[in-house]
Image: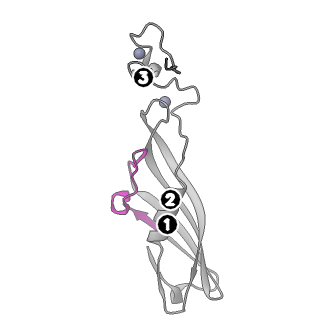
Amino acid sequence: MRVRVEEIPPGGLTVAEQLDPANLNLETPDIRFTGPLTVKAFLEREGDAVEVRVEAAGPTEQACRRCLEPTARPFETRFELSFPVGSDDVLDLTPDIRGELFLNYPVEFLCRADCLGLCTRCGANLNQGGCRCAAPQRVTRSG
Ligand SMILES: [Zn+2]
Ligand SMILES: [Zn+2]
């Protein structure tokens, strides 16, 4: 996502682009994009800087913290960036946007609030109805 600074009018400039998550290496073990990432940026000159307000959204699958099951969920975030510039510069927003996306990933995603998680003995997904262990225990004590 590149913008020439001289093309930003006094009232600001909106640019929108669909980015391919695969090109950006956006995936982590916990989050996988299932469609393009839509990025909308509003750029405004402020003296020797360009202030950018970014909205990004895309469909993802996220791994539940408890049961590890991938669950479809829209990812949506907004943040602001600031670049010191000269008037003949070309801004490449993509690396900074990519960095911000990682910072804005959800940290504690659960497939549902009352997710039962995995059996600590056999690893079965307890949301799918129990397992063969007589008394599955969520917390095990050693000794
Ligand atoms: Zn879960
Ligand atoms: Zn079990």
CB under 8 Å between discs 2 and 1: yes
Q: Which mark is residue 125?
A: 3
- Residue placed farthest to the top in the image? 134
Please say if 102 is above or below 116. below
Q: How far apart are the alpha carbons under marks 2 and 3?
A: 30 Å
Closest to the camera, between mark 3 and mark 1, is: 3
Q: Reply above or below: 130 against 40.
A: above
Location of residue 32 in the rendering, given as x and y in whole percent from the top left corner: 39, 47
Residue 54 sits inside the magenta stretch: no
Are dots 3 and 1 in contact, CB under 8 Å?
no
SS category of the residue bearing label 2 = helix
- Residue at 44% across / 6% down in the picture? 134
The N terminus lies in which quarter of the figure?
bottom left
**Mark before the other along the chain sequence, 2 or 3:** 2
Q: Which residue is mark 2?
A: 101
Highlighted range, magenta? 16-35
Q: Is mark 2 within 8 Å of ligand 1?
A: no
Percent coordinates x, y for residue 39 in the rendering: 49, 63
Say whether mark 3 is within 8 Å of ligand 1.
yes
Residue extending farthest to the left is 23
| Crowding near the residue tagged with mark 3, few <14, some 14–19, many ≥20 C-alpha atoms within 10 Å | some
Q: Find disc 1 in the rendering and name its residue.
A: 97
